[in-house]
């Protein structure tokens, strides 16, 4: 598990959402740049993510959604000198990658401010450079509160 990058990260993003009576749609772009090196003399690669979604209310309190997400990330810059690639093959520099994922969701709107959400996300395209773990699918479940 990686809790952070160990560097100061610059995150820039923008989103645009349009609401209609029974449906909504939107787009979002996020870029993350890792500034400098961490205490182990490496930096996690920068990334760009673009997301687009559409949601349709099909009952009074339930909606479904379709989301498409494209992400591109660069490889790690530098390496931890204490890791020996001859002894640990996964210690080699990971070189980034890109993915295109589709998510199908179901939302229960409890009231104007509370919503329960679920989404199944699967990769359509996944191109990994170097030694990395692929993601087969993921499930998101949560509670959202709107301020």
Image (cartoon, rainbow, N blue to C red):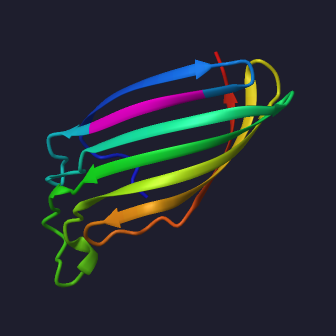
**Residue range corresponding to the magenta coloring:** 25-32
Residue drawn at (48%, 22%) of the image: 16
Nearer to us in this view, 50 or 94: 50
Residue 72 is covered by the magenta coloring: no
Q: Position of residue 26 (x, y in %)?
A: 53, 28
Most prominent secondary structure in the magenta stretch? strand
Residue 19 image position (x, y, % from top left): 63, 19
Q: Is residue 136 above or below residue 16?
A: below
**Seen in the image, is 91 located left or right of residue 13?**
left
Quadrant of res 109? top right
Extreme residue in the right direction:
60
Seen from the viewer's position, the closer of residues 105 and 142 is 105
Tell me if residue 46 comes above or below residue 8 in the rendering.
Answer: below
Q: Residue at x 34, y 65 (%)?
A: 127
Residue at x-position 24% and y-position 38% = 33
State the residue at coordinates (26%, 67%): 129
Give the image quarter of residue 111: top right
Does 28 appear in magenta?
Answer: yes
Occupied quadrant, residue 57: top right
Position of the C terminus by quadrant: top right
Q: Is residue 64 left or right of residue 33?
A: right
Of residue 38 and residue 118, the one placed in the foreground of this image is: 118
């Amino acid at each position: 598990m990686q809790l952070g990058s160990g560097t100061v990260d610059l995150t820039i993003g923008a989103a645009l959402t349009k609401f209609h009576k029974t449906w909504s749609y939107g787009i979002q772009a996020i870029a993350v740049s890792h500034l400098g090196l961490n205490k182990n003399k490496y930096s996690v690669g920068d990334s760009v993510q673009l997301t687009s979604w559409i949601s349709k209310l099909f009952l009074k309190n339930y909606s479904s959604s379709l989301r498409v997400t494209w992400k591109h990330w660069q490889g790690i810059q530098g390496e931890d000198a204490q890791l020996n690639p001859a002894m640990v093959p996964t210690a080699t520099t990971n070189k980034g990658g890109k993915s295109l994922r589709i998510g199908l969701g179901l939302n229960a709107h409890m009231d104007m401010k509370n919503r329960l959400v679920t989404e199944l996300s699967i990769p359509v395209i996944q191109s990994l450079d170097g030694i990395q773990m692929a993601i087969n699918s993921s499930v998101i479940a949560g509670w959202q509160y709107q301020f």
